[in-house]
Image (spheres, grey):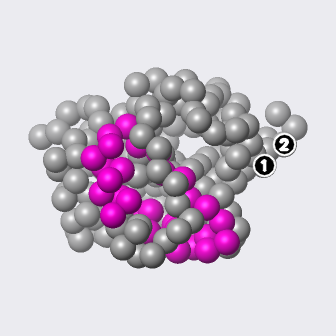
Amino acid sequence: MLGRGHFPYQLSWLIDNPMRRLLVTPEQLANRLPLMESSVILEVGPGSGYFSVELARRVPRGRLELLDLQPEMLAKAKRKLLAGGFQNVGFTTQDASSPLPYEDETFDIVVMVAVLGEVSSAEKCLRELLRVVRLGGVLVVHEHMPDPDRIPLSELRLLIEECGYMFRERSGPLWNYTATFERPIDG
């Protein structure tokens, strides 16, 4: 059984297992995001790119940036996206708890799927993401069982709201949910 910590790239085949669709499909996740064709998205911890192809497809006039700690995972995602012909994607290898190499208010949407419990400092990560998401932009966090790093919604809300975000909504059951938080315009 896997313990807490980042998901090892050697097991990325589990991320791409068709059974994962029983939890949430890339289409379902994308439908839960306030996407427009010109949206600029940051996907933190995309792993092998399970959701990335659908996100890039939904923003043909926008941009998708992938940020992952593991260069091996990022390489897998890059192969998928390049094979799909996507030109609107950037790739950065870095710890999400470190200062991010993006300007203030760069992104409309930040997406994290089963990642926040894996970062070295959730608070540092969230504060840095608050800096790079535009005013009125959103942070979308998806958590599900059986992830050993899963954060229950009540804990997630406390953590994220303490960092300056405002809870907007939850989709899905509590064991497999997507939570959307907004960066307040007046905050």
Quadrant housing residue 128: top right
Badge 1 element: strand
In this rendering, the answer to whether 123 lies above or below 169 is above
In this rendering, the answer to whether 57 lies above or below 114 is below
Say if mark 2 contacts mark 1, CB within 8 Å.
yes
Q: How many marks?
A: 2
Looking at the rendered structure, the kind of residue marked 2 is Ile
Q: Nearer the viewer, residue 187 or 51?
A: 51
Q: Report the quarter where the N terminus lies.
A: top left
Q: Count neighbours of disc 2 (C-alpha within 10 A) and say few if under 14, some if 14 to 19, many if 20 or more.
A: few
Q: Nearer the viewer, residue 101 or 164?
A: 101
Q: Which residue is located at x 52 percent, y 54 percent?
A: 90
Q: Position of residue 97 (x, y in %)?
A: 49, 27
Quadrant housing residue 31: bottom right
Q: Position of residue 157 (x, y in %)?
A: 57, 37
The residue tagged 1 is 136
Q: Which residue is located at x 67 percent, y 72 percent?
A: 61
Q: Position of residue 166 (x, y in %)?
A: 71, 40
The single residue placed furthest to the right in the displayed view is: 186
- Magenta region, residue range: 51-79
Using the rendered image of the protein, determine whether residue 165 is visible from the camera's viewpoint: no
The residue tagged 2 is 185
